[in-house]
Image (cartoon, rainbow, N blue to C red):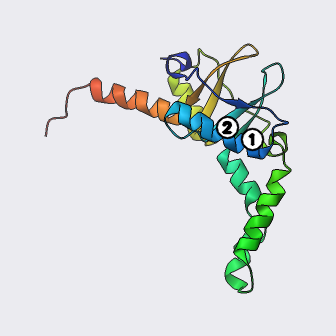
Amino acid sequence: MQARDIMNTDFHVVHPEDSIAAAALQFEVASGKEGRKVFGLMVVDDSDHLVGMLSMYDILIFLQPKNMQVWGEMEDMNPDRLFDASLDKVRGVQVGDIMTPDVVTVTPHAHILAVSDIMIKKHIRRLPVIDGNKIVGIVYVSDVFRHLSKKISTQGAPCPR
């Protein structure tokens, strides 16, 4: 069983020069098309080469005020004002400013156990599948788990008690 057997070939991308607002909209569009929440998008250049990944988590980290950890001690803080300021700040940011540029990838021939190992060791939830310089798909941790759980449940008799 290899990455090509479980990868999703209908993937969604953004470009480094896209605004974070446009990327947020693309997350919604992708989730609607997939019928499940999409939490990460591949970032490609004009030649459709992978240059990074953008996750919802990246955006949330960027939005969070730097002094958030001391809010409990500061009773005069106005969270709504800080939230509005964060939203104003993110409107001028491009995907390339906050994306993860060093992307771990796999080939279509990577064994599912190697894919799983990478995901576990590197805490990665999605892996682009690259054949040469071309993006051919993406493997989500849920796809790996779903495939392995089917194998577990269909291969093997119930344990005697």
Residue 26: image tag: 2
Residue 50: image location, x then y, percent: 76, 26
**Residue type, numbered disc 2:** Gln
Residue 147: image location, x then y, percent: 42, 27
- Determine whether the residue tagged by mark 2 lies in a helix, strand or loop: helix
Question: Which image quarter holds the C terminus?
Answer: top left
Q: Residue at x 68, y 42 (%)?
A: 25
Residue 158: image location, x then y, percent: 19, 32
Q: Is residue 62 above or below residue 136?
A: below
- Determine whether the residue tagged by mark 1 lies in a helix, strand or loop: helix
On the question of residue 13 being in view, the answer is yes
Residue 42 sits in quarter: top right
**Residue type, numbered disc 1:** Ala
Do the residues bearing badges 1 and 2 touch, measured as CB atoms within 8 Å? yes
Q: Residue furthest left?
A: 161
Residue 43 sits in quarter: top right
Which residue, given by chain and number where applicable, does mark 1 sit on? 22
Q: Residue at x 78, y 41 (%)?
A: 99
Q: Is residue 70 above or below residue 127?
A: below
Between the C-alphas of marks 1 and 2, the distance is: 6 Å
Residue 111 sits in quarter: top right
The one nearer the camera, 161 or 129, is 129
Q: Is residue 89 left or right of residue 113?
A: right
The one nearer the camera, 103 or 113, is 103
